[in-house]
Image: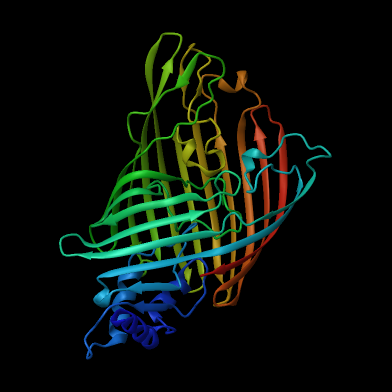
């Protein structure tokens, strides 16, 4: 009974209150909306303790763990905490519904994947209507204060993009003292160097993947930040016939970056790199072989005005296709080497992207971006595989509006092209709208 009374008293005192710090974070986040965030303190506290001060400490602790940028979930509406912020639990997410109309060469996907544009336009793929709610998301976060390790963060995030529309694990990790253990966005991505899009995949040249990893992130100065990780490798290869096949990988991918920030961390430039050792079995010579992949990237987000930001990136490498949005999982990490039977090889690949984000008011936001991916031949590979993907382009323009603090709507136009090694070309168009309720 005592516990129930305590809970009821705490609820009556502090539920339904505005938390300015989280409101500020929410304004700066992808969704750009303000809201009243409910913080519930459970447990006894001294009569002379300042509830508002306690709430401020709880919010400040939580706000330090918020990630911003591409596909990040943001700020929850509900936080439950113990006194003095020794333990914090939050639950949040959003319900997302979108409808799209596609024309020209209709892509057989829920997303606008330019590498999947059909090269032949027929009466069956000229037009299509799509409705989708599978990107609806739910996340949980807990922060436990430790004398030895400081705040320990645990995070779980899901959506409904599993088989069919089943629940899928997006992220699950533990983080403390700059160390991250678990599954989250790869270190070889700059989350702030991308536009907000209704299209779930986003720009085709963007380097994004969620990997299992051990990562260490540290700040040298207030302006300089470094990170390095060992990430679980996934190799996507094209191995026709029985000359070679992929075997279980033995060496983790090693991405790292150095970033310089200024303008109160609203602007930055980042240099990233990755090295990969990809294992396969040569059936001709009956031996295990290793092919080295590598990549280098420069990315940036620069706040040019209080309401305008410019962003972009350029990435080049070999054997890094599994990190590039448009060709992730399409079999281009390793391909057959026509000059040596049983051998596989990497292909030179480049992707670049540039765009603008404009906050017209607190309620209106616009995004525009151009993105391109290109693969080059090596050892005359294109001659024996003329239908191979060679070049794709992606154009996006959209506008978002906040009807009320928690309710977003948006409209978007997408245009994409694909070109193969034999110079065959095709293009696709998409217009879509979105309604999203954040909680």
Residue positioned 54% across, 46% down in the render:
162
Horizontal placement of 134 versus 105: left or right?
A: left
Which of 317 and 64 lies nearest the eye of the viewer?
A: 64
Q: Which color scheme did the rendering employ for the protein?
A: rainbow
**Image quadrant containing the N terminus:** bottom left
The picture quadrant where one finds residue 49 is bottom left
246 up-or-down from 338: above or below: below
Q: What is the total number of numbered labels drawn onto the structure image? A: 0
- Residue in the image at 47% along x and 47% along y: 208
Q: Is residue 206 left or right of residue 65?
A: right
Q: Position of residue 50 (x, y in %)?
A: 26, 88
Q: Is residue 437 above or below residue 345?
A: below
Residue 119 left/right relative to 359: right
Residue found at x 75% / y 42%: 105
Q: Is residue 272 left or right of residue 314?
A: left
Residue sitting farthest toward the front: 1
**x, y percentage for residue 42?**
32, 77
Relative to residue 326, is residue 62 depicted above or below? below
As drawn, 401 above or below 236: below
Instruction: Give the residue drawn at x 61%, y 58%.
Output: 198
Q: Residue furthest bottom?
A: 48
Provide residue 194's location: percent of width, then percent of height: 50, 56
Question: Considering depth in this image, is 291 or 1 the residue closer to the camera?
Answer: 1
Q: Residue 350 in the image: x percent, y percent?
A: 51, 39
Q: Nearer the viewer, residue 437 or 42?
A: 42
Q: Nearer the viewer, residue 431 or 392?
A: 431
Extreme-left residue of the structure? 148
Residue at the limit of the structure toward the top, as seen here: 285
């Amino acid at each position: 009974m005592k516990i129930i009374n305590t809970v009821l008293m705490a609820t009556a005192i502090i539920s339904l209150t505005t938390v300015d710090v989280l409101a500020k974070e929410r304004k700066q986040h992808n969704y750009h909306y303000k809201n009243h965030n409910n913080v519930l303190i459970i447990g006894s506290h001294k009569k002379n303790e300042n509830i508002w001060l306690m709430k401020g400490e709880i919010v400040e602790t939580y706000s330090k763990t918020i990630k911003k940028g591409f596909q990040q979930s943001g700020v929850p509406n509900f936080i439950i905490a113990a006194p003095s912020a020794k333990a914090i639990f939050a639950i949040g997410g959003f319900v997302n519904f979108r409808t799209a109309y596609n024309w020209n060469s209709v892509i057989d996907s829920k997303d606008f994947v330019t590498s999947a544009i059909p090269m032949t336009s027929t009466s069956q793929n000229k037009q299509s209507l799509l409705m989708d709610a599978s990107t609806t998301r739910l996340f949980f976060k807990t922060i436990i204060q430790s004398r030895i390790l400081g705040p320990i963060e645990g995070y779980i995030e899901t959506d409904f993009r599993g088989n069919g529309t089943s629940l899928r694990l997006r992220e699950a990790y533990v983080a403390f003292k700059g160390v991250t253990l678990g599954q989250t966005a790869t270190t070889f991505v700059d989350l702030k160097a991308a536009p907000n899009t209704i299209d779930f995949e986003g720009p085709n040249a963007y380097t994004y993947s969620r990997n299992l990893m051990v990562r260490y992130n540290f700040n040298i100065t207030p302006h300089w930040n470094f990170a390095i990780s060992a990430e679980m490798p996934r190799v996507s290869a094209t191995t026709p016939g029985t000359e070679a096949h992929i075997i279980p990988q033995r060496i983790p991918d090693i991405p790292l970056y150095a970033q310089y920030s200024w303008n109160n961390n609203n602007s930055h430039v980042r240099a990233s790199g990755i090295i990969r050792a990809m294992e396969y079995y040569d059936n001709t010579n009956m031996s295990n072989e290793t092919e080295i992949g590598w990549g280098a990237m420069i990315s940036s987000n620069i706040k040019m005005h209080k309401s305008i930001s410019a962003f972009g990136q350029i990435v080049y490498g070999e054997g890094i296709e599994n990190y590039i949005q448009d060709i992730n999982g399409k079999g281009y990490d390793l391909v057959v080497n026509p000059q040596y039977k049983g051998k596989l090889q990497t292909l030179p690949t480049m992707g670049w992207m540039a765009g603008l984000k404009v906050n017209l008011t607190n309620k209106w936001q616009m995004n525009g971006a151009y993105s391109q991916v290109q693969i080059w031949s090596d050892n005359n590979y294109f001659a024996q595989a003329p239908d191979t993907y060679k070049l794709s382009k992606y154009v996006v323009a959209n506008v978002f509006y906040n009807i009320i603090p928690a309710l977003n709507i948006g409209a978007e136009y997408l245009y994409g092209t694909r070109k193969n090694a034999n110079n065959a070309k095709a293009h696709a168009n998409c217009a879509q709208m979105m309604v999203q309720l954040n909680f």
